[in-house]
Amino acid sequence: MTSLVRNGGIAASIILIILGVGAMVAGVAGREKVQNDLAREQIVGTPDSTIPGQKVDTGGEAKAFAAVMRKHTLEATGGQTYAQMGRFLDESGKPTSDEAAAAKDPKSGQPVENPARNIWISSTAFQTALNTAYFAESVATFVIAMGGALLLAGIGFLILTLRLLKPEPATARAVRTGATAVAAS
């Protein structure tokens, strides 16, 4: 029975070590992918951001740039979010949600849409992508940490298994089972 338990402990330890190394490799690859994808977009922090003139190529920088984009979008829309703006523009160019009060496009005859709402749509899409990059990099970092924990647990479990579940010498086994040890001649 001891041999089975010992071999099971060794196998479990090896599995934990392999999973730990695999998780760490996957986490590092995930971080590199996020950072390379961000760098490829060649985004540079604006002068009023927390990263002025700096290339956005990490999740933290992406989050910072998303925050300044929101600030700029609020400035462009008079402090209103998408849901707060009127859907259309009336004859005087003021926002309205009443389709009947909206100015009509002379070519199509359709109500004139509020262009400030399109700013929000574009900005929100970009902010979401940047915040997703931040989240993805954070998850990859967590995977690296968990991989390290699995690796250390596997190593610790292996050490315990090898130290505490040593194979019994033949004489100790014979005494325990009541058998007589036979010396080799």
Image: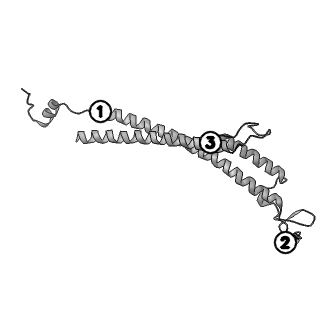
Task: Tell me residue 27's x, y (percent).
Answer: 53, 42
Q: Are marks 1 and 3 in contact (CB under 8 Å)?
A: no
The residue positioned 87% from the left and 71% from the top of the image is 107
Disc 3 designates what residue?
36
- Mark 1 falls on what kind of element? helix
Q: Report the number of numbered marks.
A: 3
Look at discs 1 and 2 and give the one toward the viewer.
2
Task: Tell me residue 134's x, y (percent).
Answer: 64, 45
The residue positioned 83% from the left and 67% from the top of the image is 97
Query: In the orientation shown, which residue stands out farthest toward the top?
Result: 185
Q: Quadrant of residue 2?
A: top left
Q: Name which of mark 2 and mark 3 comes first in the sequence.
A: 3
Look at discs 1 and 3 and give the one toward the viewer.
3
**113 is higher (above) or lower (below) than 134:** below
Q: Is residue 26 left or right of residue 131?
A: left
Give the class, few, some or many, for how many residues have Cα within 10 Å of label 1's Cα (few <14, many ≥20).
few
Residue nearest the observer in this picture, 21 or 97: 21
Q: Dividing the image into 4 quarters, which one contains the N terminus?
A: top left
Q: Amino acid at mark 3?
A: Asn
Q: Name which of mark 1 and mark 3 comes first in the sequence.
A: 3
Task: Tell me residue 163's x, y (percent).
Answer: 30, 31
Disc 1 designates what residue?
164
Task: Tell me residue 25's x, y (percent).
Answer: 49, 40
Q: Are marks 1 and 2 in contact (CB under 8 Å)?
A: no
Q: Dividing the image into 4 quarters, which one contains the C terminus?
A: top left
The residue positioned 13% from the left and 37% from the top of the image is 177
Disc 2 designates what residue?
108
The residue positioned 76% from the left and 47% from the top of the image is 69
Q: Amino acid at mark 1?
A: Leu
